[in-house]
Amino acid sequence: MPEMPEVETIRRELDEKVKGGEITKVEVRSAKPLKNATVEEFINVVEGATIEDVKRRGKILIINLSSGYSLLIHLKLTGRLLYEAASAPMEKHTHVIFSLDEHQLRFWDQRQFGYIKVFKTEDLPNASEVKELGPEAMGDDFTLEAFQKLLQTRKRSPMKPLLMDQNFIAGVGNVYADEALYYAGVQPTRIVSSLSPEEIAKIYEGIRRILPAALEHQGSSVDLYVDIYGRQGEYMPYLKAYGREGEPCERCGTPIRRITLRGRGAHFCPKCQK
């Protein structure tokens, strides 16, 4: 699932390419991604509107329209937004098409867990997907002190699932939770109350270092993620733990181990991470 670096890459590219563009036509080839509007309602609100800007909250893209409505887009596991020439061949699993002059913005999703919702822009802050999110992992208000205070409210939680909880911190997922904990030398199963102040500070430092580093490389294509031009992210060679099961730890040579923790995989070094 795309995390902050991947979604922010897409947001920046969309803001550059489609901001100010008019959506001249909308084609819905599958209604499944539309979660809170009928096809007719969706087309009536979106078609003919101009894209005013593209925002992001956590892993969610928000496209604000001149019609007074906003599109809330969650790519989930396999969703893509692809900016292509209108003449380009239409790929299977393309479900919603926004026409912009000679180009199209195509919502593609192989497994169809992703979705698009439409809200009045003024009502968007009250949408549950937005309202319930925690602080942005790279936001100015997410300081070490704020992180410490948040942890005090979840003392019995294991660290890996907690870092992935979007209501706790917005933007960190499976990949970068593994990487932040590896950076800090903390095992993913550690309970919050067992952490020292130094370990907490190191986890925070890992989050604040790794996410912008991944963003500089347009994210990690560990699954089906690509940017709006169909290009893969280039951060995978820099991953130290995620996806490296059985490979030697770069610090000590011990094979990276993978376990299942609350239904999700967790990668770590059993020697370096305590």
Image: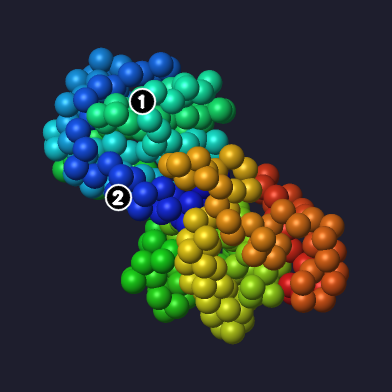
Q: In this orientation, which residue lies closer to the viewer: 233 or 203? A: 233
Above or below for 148 versus 260: below
Relative side of 28 to 202, left or right: left
Residue topped by disc 2: 16
Q: Measuring 64% from the left and 68% from the top, which residue is drawn there? A: 181
Mark 2, secondary structure of its residue: helix
Above or below for 250 versus 227: below
Going from N to C along the chain, the mark reached first, 2 or 1, is: 2
**Res 269 → quadrant:** bottom right
Real-space Cα distance between discs 2 and 1? 18 Å
Q: In this orientation, which residue lies closer to the viewer: 245 or 187? A: 245
> Which of pointers 2 and 1 indicates the residue nearer the eye?
1
Look at label 1 and name its amino acid: Ala
**Res 272 → quadrant:** bottom right
**Res 47 → quadrant:** top left
Look at label 2 and name its amino acid: Glu
